[in-house]
């Protein structure tokens, strides 16, 4: 299920990379390069966009670092880019950052932080992926105490103002 969910997430990120008026041609070219397996070309196009603050490009760069596609595999770099994107409200990045916290990949393993980010993603995601995000959030919750869930919900409700992670 995790593997098929990852492919869904890539499709969601790619759809977002190709959308939007500003720099649409560069994002479309990056999405096309990624879809055709030319990860090096996708990275060359996405990195400048990510550095300029484009949330979708940041999420995709994070994914590329996490998977080692077009960029060297580096979980710390992936979580850096996920966070930059997630803090701008990108639900795909919020979901991927939640998974990183759940697994301790590039960030300290923290179920409360994972729940917060997965909860935010599930609440704000487009209808097509919302159910998948909620399912994974609920699977995580099944491993947590009621107190941990309440703390994760508290941080999600107060995001972005009151959150240490």
Image (cartoon, rainbow, N blue to C red):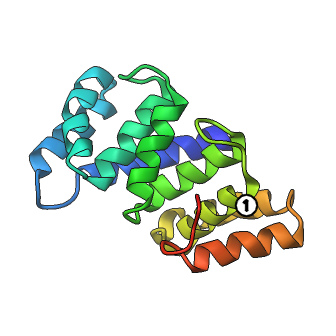
**Residue at the image position 61 percent from the left and 53 percent from the top:** 98
Percent position of residue 103, x then y: 70, 40
Whether residue 128 sits left or right of residue 133 in the image: it is: left
Observer-nearest of 110 and 90: 110
76 w.r.t. 120: above or below:
above
| Crowd rating for badge 1 (residues with CA inside 10 Å; few <14, some 14–19, many 20+) | many
Secondary structure at numbered mark 1: helix
Image quadrant where one finds the C terminus: bottom right
Q: Looking at the image, can residue 63 be seen? A: yes
Percent position of residue 16, x then y: 31, 55
Observer-nearest of 80 and 8: 80
Q: Looking at the image, can residue 12 be seen? A: no
**Residue at the image position 60 percent from the left and 73 percent from the top:** 156
Q: Say how many tags the image has.
A: 1
**Residue at the image position 20 percent from the left and 44 percent from the top:** 49
Residue occupied by mark 1: 112
Whether residue 33 sits left or right of residue 59 in the image: it is: left
Percent position of residue 100, x then y: 61, 44
Percent position of residue 137, x then y: 70, 62
Image quadrant where one finds the N terminus: top right
**Residue at the image position 19 percent from the left and 33 percent from the top:** 45
- Please tell me in which quadrant of the rendered image residue 138 appears: bottom right
18 w.r.t. 161: above or below:
above
């Amino acid at each position: 299920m995790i593997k098929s969910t990852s492919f869904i997430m890539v499709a969601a990120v790619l759809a977002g990379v190709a959308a939007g008026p500003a720099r649409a041609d560069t994002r479309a070219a990056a999405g096309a390069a990624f879809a055709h397996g030319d990860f090096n070309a996708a990275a060359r196009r996405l990195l400048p966009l990510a550095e300029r603050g484009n949330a979708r490009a940041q999420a995709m760069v994070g994914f590329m670092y996490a998977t080692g596609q077009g960029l060297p595999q580096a979980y710390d770099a992936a979580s850096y880019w996920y966070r930059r994107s997630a803090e701008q409200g990108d639900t795909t990045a919020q979901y991927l950052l939640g998974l990183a916290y759940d697994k301790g990949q590039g960030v300290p393993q923290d179920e409360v932080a994972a729940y917060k980010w997965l909860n935010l993603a599930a609440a704000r995601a487009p209808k097509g992926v919302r159910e998948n995000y909620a399912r994974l959030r609920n699977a995580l919750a099944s491993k947590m105490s009621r107190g941990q869930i309440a703390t994760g919900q508290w941080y999600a409700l107060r995001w972005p103002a009151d959150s240490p992670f």
